[in-house]
């Protein structure tokens, strides 16, 4: 099968995956905001309802650092966020803050965590690489003990972002730091699903280097909202 067909089938198959775990490391430099690194893991399930549990061990992006990392649990249309920096900023008294998704635009810290959820998303990331016109197989390699085929290529960001749902495109552009072309490597196992994805690119002083490992496809994951007595609301007017 042609390498481009493998990618297109992988994108279709990832859309059908109901759960997985991803470990990721993302390092970036930005001409204005300096350099940073995000490291963490995410549990994902699409059924019976969309739920995500994201843990950021470290999240330092130039002026937007999250000292002490962050944790976010998304269930349906509500996200629960535990960010020390945000709690200090808004004077929250509970460790977790509950925010309806419709109010997300108000808070930089909340938006930063949401951007990470999108960057760790298997479906989004696999769709991006289908925009490649030059992908080719570069051999067989083992990833975490599983046999995979390694594919390598590049994709133009503006075309790749158009593969995503309309409401995800702007955030993806920001996540890719307005890079022009991105080089990627993807390792696909015999079941047609990716086990590893690496992206790197640069433009006018900005760079992106991301590595994601995927596992636990369609295995049960436990994603639970934090206990109610640990959850407070995001105080109004204190969200920037």
Image: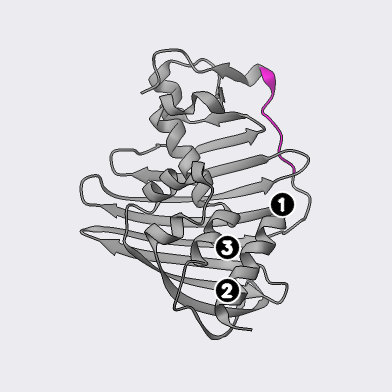
Cα separation, mark 3 vs mark 1, equals: 14 Å
Q: Secondary structure under badge 1? A: strand
Asked where in the image residue 209 lies, by quadrant, the reply is bottom left
Q: Is residue 17 left or right of residue 60?
A: right
Describe residue 102's horizontal placement relative to residue 90 as left or right: right
When the figure is inspected, residue 98 is found, relative to residue 158, above or below; the finding is above
**Residue placed most toward the observer, 171 or 107:** 171
Q: CA distance from mark 2 to mark 1?
A: 19 Å
Magenta span of residues: 222-228
Q: Disc 2 on helix, strand or loop?
A: strand
Q: Is residue 227 magenta?
A: yes
Q: Which mark is residue 187?
A: 2
Image quarter (top left, top right, bottom left or bottom right) of the C terminus = top left
Q: Main secondary structure of the magenta part?
A: loop
Discs 3, 1 touching: Cβ within 8 Å: no
Give the side of residue 77 with respect to residue 136, left or right: right
The quadrant of the picture occupied by the N terminus is: bottom right
The residue singled out by tag 1 in the image is 19
Marks 3,2: beta carbons within 8 A: no
Q: Residues within 10 Å of mark 1 (few under 14, many from 20)?
A: many
Q: Nearer the viewer, mark 3 or mark 2?
A: 2
Asked if the magenta segment contains residue 52, the reply would be no
The image quadrant that residue 61 belongs to is: top left
Position of residue 122 measured from the top left corner of the image (x, y, whole percent): 59, 56
In three-dimensional space, the C-alpha distance between marks 3 and 2, rounded to whole angstroms, equals: 10 Å
Give SS at disc 3: strand
Mark linked to residue 213: 3
Q: Residues within 10 Å of mark 3 (few under 14, many from 20)?
A: many
Residue 189 position, x and y percent, is 67, 74
Closer to us: 221 or 193: 193
């Amino acid at each position: 099968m042609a390498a481009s067909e493998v990618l297109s089938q992988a994108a279709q198959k990832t859309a059908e995956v109901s759960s997985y775990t991803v470990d990721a490391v993302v390092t970036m430099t930005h001409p204005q905001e300096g350099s940073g690194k995000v490291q963490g893991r995410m549990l994902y399930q699409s059924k019976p309802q969309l739920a995500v549990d994201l843990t950021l061990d470290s999240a330092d992006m130039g002026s937007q650092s999250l000292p002490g990392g962050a944790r976010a649990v998304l269930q349906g249309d509500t996200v629960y966020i535990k960010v020390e920096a945000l709690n200090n900023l808004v004077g929250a008294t509970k460790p977790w803050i509950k925010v309806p998704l419709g109010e997300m635009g108000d808070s930089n810290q909340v938006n930063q965590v949401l951007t990470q959820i999108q960057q760790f998303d298997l479906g989004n990331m696999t769709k991006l690489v289908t925009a490649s016109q030059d992908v080719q197989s570069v051999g067989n390699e083992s990833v975490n003990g599983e046999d995979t085929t390694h594919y390598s290529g590049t994709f133009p960001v503006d075309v790749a972002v158009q593969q995503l749902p309309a409401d995800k495109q702007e955030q993806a552009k920001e996540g890719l730091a307005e890079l022009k072309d991105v080089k990627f490597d993807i390792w696909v196992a015999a079941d047609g699903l990716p086990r590893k994805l690496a992206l790197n690119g640069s433009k006018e002083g900005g760079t992106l280097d991301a590595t994601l490992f995927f596992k636990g496809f369609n295995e049960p994951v436990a994603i639970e909202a934090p206990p109610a007595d640990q959850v407070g609301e995001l105080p109004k007017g204190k969200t920037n």
